[in-house]
Amino acid sequence: MIVGRRKAVILDLVLLAGLAGLGGFLLYRITVHLQYSWHWSRIPGYILRYDGEKHRWVANYLLLGLLTTLRLSLWGGLLAVILGLAMALARTGRSLYRQLVARIYVQLMRNLPPLVIIFLFYFFLADQVIPHLELDLHARQAAPAVRRLLTLLVAEPGSISTFLAAVCSLALFEGAYITEILRAGIEAVDRSQWEAAHALGLSRLQALRHIILPQALRQVLPALAGQFISLIKDSSIVSVISIQELTYQGSQLMASTYLTIEVWVTVALMYMLLTFPCSLLVARLEKRLARRLV
Amino acid sequence: MEHAMNEEEPESDIIIARNLHKTFPGPVAALVDFSVTVRRGEVLVIVGPSGSGKSTFLRCLNGLEEVESGSIIVDGIPLDDNQRHRLEIRREVGMVFQSFNLFPHLDVLENVSLAQRLVRGKSRAEARGCSLELLARVGLADKAASYPAELSGGQQQRVAIARALAMMPRVMLFDEATSALDPEMIGEVLDVMRQLAEEGMTMVVVTHEMGFAREVSDRVLFMEHGRVIEEGTPGEFFNHPRRQRTREFLRQIL
Ligand SMILES: Nc1ncnc2c1ncn2[C@@H]1O[C@H](COP(=O)(O)OP(=O)(O)O)[C@@H](O)[C@H]1O
Ligand SMILES: [Mg+2]
């Protein structure tokens, strides 16, 4: 055992040394051959800046982008779960018509590139549906407190319509995966649980709500959390429709400052800030579930 | 609720099943022209080799399976296409499964209380009181806060019986309630069933426990290939079986 350990340690050291060497080589290539001049010191200013008029620190491009990504992910996630639940129930239900609708939805979403879905749906929503709600007009006329709350939770008055269209497009696309996760969870609950509920006189809806779904959700919680991580990452797609989330802000900043590597490394770290805690949560959930099932 | 059948049928018959046919894909004839009548307060034991259609019959009685033809009337309510009738029958008929089928995510108290609240509309406190009483009756008053996974098989099955009784059913169906149990736990479940029979509950019991059939039942029915082969009082059935096939079956099992 001890010998095995030591061998592993030596192997680890060799690997680490190799990685460090590779990293050093890359840095060398970038600095010397590309004659890249590092300007890390300018990055913090793009995260927070001091507002001389208001005499306080305010969020700058990158932090604003991060917050937008967070808002996109939370609303998109919520909507995707609602949509996914409805579709999973339709898919496992008794109505053939609803089964067909859910099946077509999932197939469409899974067989089209996300980018195409986003463009199609976004232009449909943004041009045809959402403008008629005149959300931004209402938002601008709302009381200052409401406006501040909207800005904090959704988006600034003026870009609410665009934001909503982006959230809907994202939810539509992620909802298909959540549908499949929930469907698998519902189908994993043993038939005998339905039968026991049925024999006690519970209606189908009561059985779903009190017996089947609680067990199904417990099974798929780690998968759902994992899908939420995907959603955070996939939210970068809506940068193509000019939602000012983290990736969009990163590309704007890169175009105006040429701090290519600094900006993208920072953006990557900021995404990690969102996704890494989720990953830890998934790991903990999986451990807890495993213990319960023993 | 119309109880139209009460006019024609004698009040004392609580289950009237006539000419049931049920075929599973295969095709497997699970029930073939199967007819049986159960009187109020009667304990009917059904025996037969594996695959003879015993479970199928019980499951048809509470609508878990659909019969292809024939008629079932439970406590005057016909089991037909009328969803109200079907629901009514499911509420009047309690069922205990071979594999217990407790709800693993709910504690024992909730297992017993849930349907009382959802189906009978009882308040939480009312359901709780009733559940604790029932759990005491099956000897598990101290397990109210346990989860099914923390109980032995015998204890789980007794909870399942309490859960079914909580709906105040007029008929209880037992589908091999002791077959999945370790031998030392069979007795505790049979005791609860015996007590229930003494209290006058109408019971249809599928079992391989011939001792139970002999002592507790009012009538024993032997079925094979979906048909009734022979039925009679336990005395007649065990001591003087009329059919050759029954004698062979009893020789194998006793
Ligand atoms: N869901 C089903 N699908 C197909 N065949 C079934 C199903 N349920 C029961 N059967 C068949 O019907 C016959 C009767 O089964 P069952 O009523 O379970 O018998 P028993 O309870 O007497 O052992 C058996 O041959 C069995 O294989
Ligand atoms: Mg059986």
Image: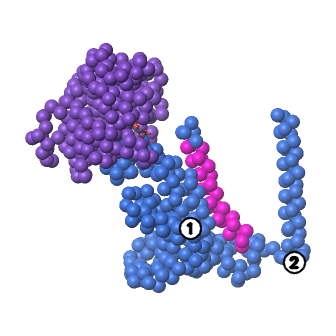
Please state the horizontal and vertical placement of residue B18, each as a whole percent of the image.
24, 39
Furthest residue toward left: B7
N-term-proximal mark, 1 vs 2? 2
Give the residues drawn in magenta, as a range. Answer: A263-289
Q: In this view, does B108 lie above or below A134?
A: above
> Which residue corresponds to the image point at 38% horizontal and 76% vertical from the top-left?
A143
Q: In the image, which is nearer the foreground, mark 1 or mark 2? A: 1
Residue type at mark 1: give it: Arg
Q: Is residue A281 magenta?
A: yes
Q: Which chain carries label 2?
A: A
Task: Look at the image and say whether residue A65 sits in the magenta stretch.
Answer: no
The chain holding disc 1 is: A
- Position of residue B252 measured from the top left corner of the image (x, y, whole percent): 44, 20
- Magenta span: chief secondary structure: helix
- Asked if badges 1 and 2 are on one and the same chain, I answer yes
Residue beneath the point at 87% across and 73% down: A31
Q: How far apart are marks 1 and 2 (CA)?
A: 44 Å
SS of the residue at dot 2? loop
The residue positioned farthest toward the front in the image shown: B244
| Placement of A193 over or under B165, stated as above or below | below
The residue nearer to you, when weighing A272 against B30, is B30
Label 1 close to label 2 by CB (< 8 Å): no
Q: Which amino acid does label 2 sit on?
A: Gln
Along the viewing direction, whichever of A171 and B242 lies nearer the viewer = B242
What color is chain A drawn in?
blue
Task: Answer with left or right where residue A202 lies relative to residue A182.
Answer: left
Give the colour of chain B.
Answer: purple
Tell me the residue that label 1 is attached to.
A110
Res A180 visible: yes
Q: Which mark is drawn over residue A79?
A: none
Q: Residue B158: give x, y in percent of width and height.
A: 37, 28
**Can residue B62 be spotted in the picture?**
no
